[in-house]
Structures are given as structure tokens and as C-alpha cells.
Image (spheres, grey):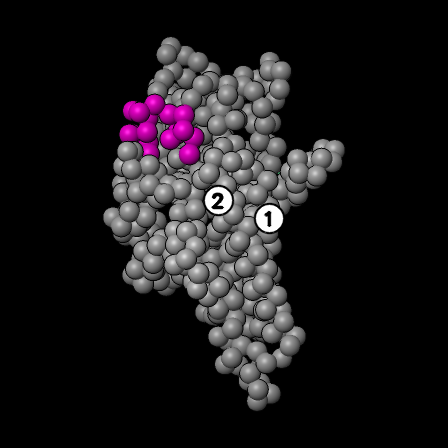
Amino acid sequence: MPASTQESANSDPLNARIATVHEATRAISRQFPRSYILDCIKADRFPEEMWRAMGKQGLLGLSVPEEHGGSGGGVVEIVALGEALALGGVPTLFLVVTGLSRVPIIRHGTAQQIARFVTPTCDGSVKICFAITEPDAGTNSFNMSTFARPEGDGWILNGQKVFISGARDADYMLVIARTRKVSEVRHRTDGMSLFVVDMKSPGIRLDLLNIQVETAERQYQVFFDDVRLPADSLIGEADKGARLMFEGLNSERLLAASAAIGLADFVLKKAVSYALDRKPFGKPIGSYQALQHRLALAKAELEAARLMTYSAAERFDAGEDAGAHANMAKLLASRAAAAAMDAAIQTHGGYAFDRDYDIITLWPMIRLMEIAPINNEMLLNYIGEHVLGLPKSY
Ligand SMILES: Cc1cc2nc3c(=O)[nH]c(=O)nc-3n(C[C@H](O)[C@H](O)[C@H](O)COP(=O)(O)OP(=O)(O)OC[C@H]3O[C@@H](n4cnc5c(N)ncnc54)[C@H](O)[C@@H]3O)c2cc1C
């Protein structure tokens, strides 16, 4: 935890919540340092041992109520977990998609659906990924064409999704699909439904994408060809899935923000350590204001983004509308991370481009955060329209 928040951890309830999770995660980070995740990436395998250890320690159960087999706590706790993992240099996209996917199931699923799809994710024995993006619709998800038509008491799913993180490693995939054509609904947010799809179902095909982001989760194009979905794969009410999904997306934005602030701190620490050591003119390069101010500004921006992220998480946990704050948090955190990354690259000079220094290897992941899970332009659109009351721009 940054020194600023550590100091007040005992007196401030929010910081006490964060400190508890950070403390528990440090044991995981010691056992599974960045070199472990880099080995997993090289071997193209899911960090199963780390995931199971997180489950055993109750970390994967954070934000899941105890009556559903979780460890309790709220978005603050799972955001603190995301930050702590990234602080150790081990950001996991799978935590983001797991955290997001569980929200609508817990809130709108039946007791049986929660027991089957959520409870076993808490010890890591079952994994769930999330699929919304489509090749043609892109950011305009309401324009999706993946379609589930009713058949018997279930559904038949056809279509395709793209960029789906961890699809190979997941047991289930939370899929949002149209159940009514856009032409048949009054508003384009109507007519979409949420399904939990068993990844062993016949008719699912995965094509690995050639994505250069250093994470253990790979991205896939996923094809659904007449995939039969039983009735109990539908979460909540049919045709009302968009609203359910939006509830989860706020926590996804905050999990993305948590990874951004944790990684920003991780690269800044690396940059500071290098800046103290490197002395091409006899004095440490960290003594030159051109570099020092750049690093200091990145630190200040990172701390501001951090405050916004936890403020949004607290709002979410208090049941308040966290939309604007979550969007602002992800916007600020991803920009702060990009600034920290840029400062770290400048500090390392030519060595920034030597993969063995593990600086350039962090760049795609950090840069991605300005684009995914939602690009920053859409966040600015939201703030412009819903916070400032300006006309819709697209
Ligand atoms: C490594 C990785 C992991 C991912 N994991 C998942 C996952 O697990 N599940 C999943 O469903 N998706 C996932 N995604 C998809 C990701 O969420 C999308 O790539 C992202 O939402 C942007 O969609 P797009 O790439 O189609 O961009 P496009 O929609 O083509 O947009 C391109 C650019 O245009 C601009 N733009 C678009 N629309 C507007 C607008 N209205 N106003 C202003 N500017 C605009 C933005 O700058 C944007 O970056 C992942 C992507 C990557 C790269």
C-alpha cells in the first residue's frame, strides 16, 4: 500500500478494509512473484497454482456473500485485491472478468444458479469468463448479432464473440446475446439476455488470437453454432439483460482501475530504483528534475486516481449510483498508469526496450487499459452526457 494510505490504515475504516486485503495478498505475491507469471506466459498456461492458493486463502471469495460460500466484503475488497496483485507485478485479467460476471448472477440468479456458477469460483475450482465484444459491433455492443432463440424450454445460441480473455481456461462463460432483433424492440437496450454457457457444450469453437499483451490469459474468438442452452442458463428475465449487465460493468471498470493503479505503482517503483542507480554523468539520473518531476507528477496523478477508485467502490458498496464515479475512476487510473509507464520508459532510456528489464513488457497491458474493457472516449462521452448534461455526441 502507498505510504499515504498506510499511515491512516488504523484510524480510517476504508483504509482498514484495504489494508486487511493487502496484507493477505502479500503472502500470495511472495509465493507467486512476477517471475512466476512470466513463466506461465512463456509456457502458455493458466496460473493455476496461484489461482488455487488465492481460493484457499479466501481471496477469490471476496465480494461474494458468505451465505453463498464467499468471504464477504464488497467491491472495496475485490478492488483492493486487484490493486495488491498488480502492486506485486501480477495483474490478472481473469480477476476482472470473474468479478464482473458474478455480480448479475448473485443479484438476479436463482439459488441453484448461484450455487452452481458462483460458489465454486470462490475456491478457484470453477472459472467463469465474460463475453460481450463482437467483431462488427465493437464498442457499440447494442448492435450485437449473437442471437439466442427459444426452443423447447431452453434456447439455441448462434453468433460469435471476439477478444474473450481466458475462454480456454474457463468452465463457464457469461454471454450477453440478443433474444429479440433490434427492429422488434422499442429501445435498442431491450431484447438482450444474459446466459451462463457451459464451455463443454457442443457447438462452441475457440480460435486463439495473436494478442501481444503479457498476461497469462489469452484472447479468443468464440463461435457459437447451434449451441443448446438449458432453461436454467438464463440469468434473470429474458430481454432485460442489458440492465443486469450494466450493474456488473461498474464493478468491471473499478477492477480495471485497480489493476491500473497497482501496475502504475509497480512501474514507478522500478523506475525510481533505476533512477537512483543509473549515473551516466556521475550523479543519479533521478536527481535531474526533467526525470524527477515526471516521476513525481505520475505519482501524484496515481494517488488521485486511487482515491477516486476507492471512493467509487465505497459508493457501489453503499448501494448508491456509482456510474459516474466508476467511469471517472477508470478514466483517471488508466491515464495515470499510462503516464507512469511513459515516465518509466523515459527513465530507463535504451534499456526500457530490453525485454530482460521487464519495462517494455508491461507497456501493452498498461496501454490496453485506455481501450479495454471500455475505451476512454466512451467514458468521456458518459461524463459529457450524463454528468455535464451535454448532447450525445455519437
Ligand atoms: C487484451 C484484451 C482483452 C479483452 N478481453 C475481453 C473480454 O474478456 N471480454 C470481452 O467481451 N471483450 C474483451 N476485450 C474487448 C475490448 O473490450 C474491446 O476491444 C474494446 O471494448 C474496444 O472495442 P473495439 O476493439 O471493437 O474498438 P472499436 O469499437 O472499433 O473502437 C475503436 C476506437 O474508436 C474510438 N471510438 C469508438 N466508439 C467511439 C465513440 N462512440 N466515441 C468516441 N470514440 C469512439 C475509441 O478510441 C476506440 O478505441 C478485450 C480486448 C483486448 C485487447
Q: Which type of secondary structure does the marked residue at label 1 adopt?
A: helix
In the displayed structure, 279 sits above or below 16; it is: below
Q: Is residue 107 magenta?
A: yes
Q: Amino acid at mark 2?
A: Ala
Q: Position of residue 314 (x, y in %)?
A: 47, 44
Report which quarter residue 150 is drawn in: top left
Position of residue 311 in the picture relative to residue 124 (left or right) = right
Give the magenta part as a residue range. Answer: 103-121
* Residue at the far left in the pictured view: 56
Report which quarter residue 90 is drawn in: bottom left
* Residue drawn at the location 47% of the way across and 35% of the way down: 319
Residue 153: image tag? none
Residue 180 seen in the current view: yes
Q: Position of residue 39 (x, y in %)?
A: 36, 60
* Residue drawn at the location 59% of the way across and 60% of the way down: 301
**Which residue occupies the foreground of this view, 357 or 142?**
142
Residue 313: image tag? 2
Position of residue 343 in the picture relative to residue 116 (left or right) = right
Badge 1: how crowded within 10 Å, few (<14), some, or many (20+)? many
**2 and 1 marks in contact (CB < 8 Å):** no
Q: Position of residue 52 (x, y in %)?
A: 27, 48
Q: Which residue is mark 1?
A: 331
Residue 216 seen in the current view: no
Secondary structure mostly seen in the magenta stretch: helix
In space, the residues marked 2 and 1 are separated at their CA atoms by: 15 Å
Q: Amino acid at mark 1?
A: Leu
Q: Position of residue 258 (x, y in %)?
A: 48, 51
